[in-house]
Image: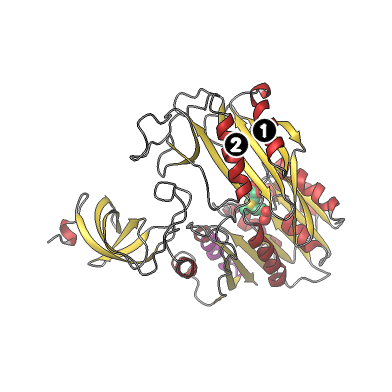
Amino acid sequence: MTTVTTLKRGSEIIVSIESLAFGGKGLARYNNIVIFVKNGIPGQKLKVVIIKKSKQYFEAKILEIISESKHYIEPVCQHFKYCGGCSFQNLDYQIQIKQKTKQIEDIFERIGNQKDYITYPIQKCKNIYEYRNKMEFTFSNRRWILKNEPLNVKSDFALGLHIPGRYDKILDINQCHIQNNIANKILNIIKEHSQHMEPYDIIKHKGFLRNLMIRHAFNTNQTMVNIVTAFEDTDILKPIVTKLVQDVNSIASIVNNITTRKAGVSIGEYEVNLYGEKYIQETINGLTFNISANSFFQTNTNQTEKLYSMIIEESDLKKTDIVYDLYCGTGTIGISMAKYVKFVYGFEIVESAVDDANVNAKLNNINNIIFFKGDLQNIFRVNLDIEKIEKPSIVVIDPPRAGMHKKTISDIIAKEPKKIIYISCNPSTQARDIKELSIYNYKLKKILPLDMFPHTPHLENIAVIEK
Ligand SMILES: C[S@@+](CC[C@H](N)C(=O)[O-])C[C@H]1O[C@@H](n2cnc3c(N)ncnc32)[C@H](O)[C@@H]1O
């Protein structure tokens, strides 16, 4: 029998999956050693092979399902087995959200050293499919060929998503179940009408078509298509534009971002407008927001309405309050709070998002808000205008996955807000930052998790912190 001391790469063992670890792998134990199993779900008994060994844990992949989990459900998506987009379409949604709550609490204890706070019940998604308002696909001349595909399948064109762990291989996608039907229709129209065009080769760095971003505003029924190319040639794209405008009623904006950068990012060095406006509009809780192609906007519209309502409720706003909205994107949170407070100041690094934020404030007749463009890593120290503004009573923080820079945390502490509402899609960095804040007598009072991303390991969490 294999023992822990002899366990090594290539060892085959039988394990039972106990829970889901943060990041989406199944967690099992073998003689008290933690084994992370790719694609394992709680309740499965599996024969696995060790693929990686480190001091504290092993990683394994499934060789055989010995007995299936009672929480198993049949995945709806034909691409599920290969696609990197969803991880748990095969796990009952009730168990997904139970596991996500447990992950946050574990992380807050392990990384944040937090114990004395209240966890509110996780806010479930009403729609667990067709919930995403934005998806990004990649064009490639290196299609991932499945074993059951015919031998003559066109291998030098794909429009889809990356095969997990492969930056160079793209799984051709026909239908993505977490985006809506309009977006799937657009995906297929573009695929059909771009077959003769040259997709970008990510290894040789040549070719034309790079990425496709589809964004749909659920409440206004406006759709944006952003085609990212390696150089500008709008004539090549004309037939696609004509077809989309003809066949898709909701098309309100088609733009072309052009990027010469080697990395596979969909933000272009510049943008050309191909049809309609350079933005679409969405409404959230009765407020209207312009969103342009390169501005951040929360990807689950339904849950965003809940998220913003919860932020307002937890902030317990007063007419005397000064709010700082850090990492404000298109200004959505600050604008949602403005009518309840004396003044809001928003801070954001992306210029197009700040432009959208200024327009959004006007669109909603909000006059007690100002947005500053800059890097929060230094903006409070390099921008002398900011030094003069009133100190905040409440700071709302909604950073990217990496969390806050240490200098930003110091700047917040120096402003002495009474309350901090910290929203994050990465509880690890959120817990790390809250640990730092707690050194300066900021206490975590409660966390309010919210599921924005069913079938994926991602989760959103609001932390209420007070001095
Ligand atoms: C998770 S989004 C939140 C946006 C907004 N609060 C919302 O709900 O739509 C994070 C935002 O932080 C911005 N950002 C990232 N790094 C930044 C930095 N160093 N300084 C200022 N803003 C930054 C991004 O451009 C993005 O708009």
Under tag 1, what secondary structure?
A: helix
Residue 77: give x, y in percent of width and height. 46, 52
Q: Is residue 108 above or below residue 176?
A: below
Image quadrant in which you'd find residue 68: bottom left
Amino acid at pointer 1: Lys
Q: Which residues are magenta?
A: 430-442
How packed mark 1 is, by other alpha carbons closer than 10 Å (few <14, some 14-19, many 20 or more), is: some
Q: Which residue is mark 2?
A: 189
Tell me, yes or no, whether the highlighted magenta stretch contains residue 99: no
Q: Choose the circle earlier in sequence order: 1 or 2.
A: 2
Is the residue marked 2 within 8 Å of ligand 1, measured from its CB? Answer: no
In percent of the image, x 20 and y 59: which residue is there? Answer: 13
For residue 377, say whether it is visible: no
Whether residue 90 is visible to the viewer of this picture, yes or no, is yes
The quarter of the picture where the N terminus appears is bottom left
Residue marked by disc 1 = 243
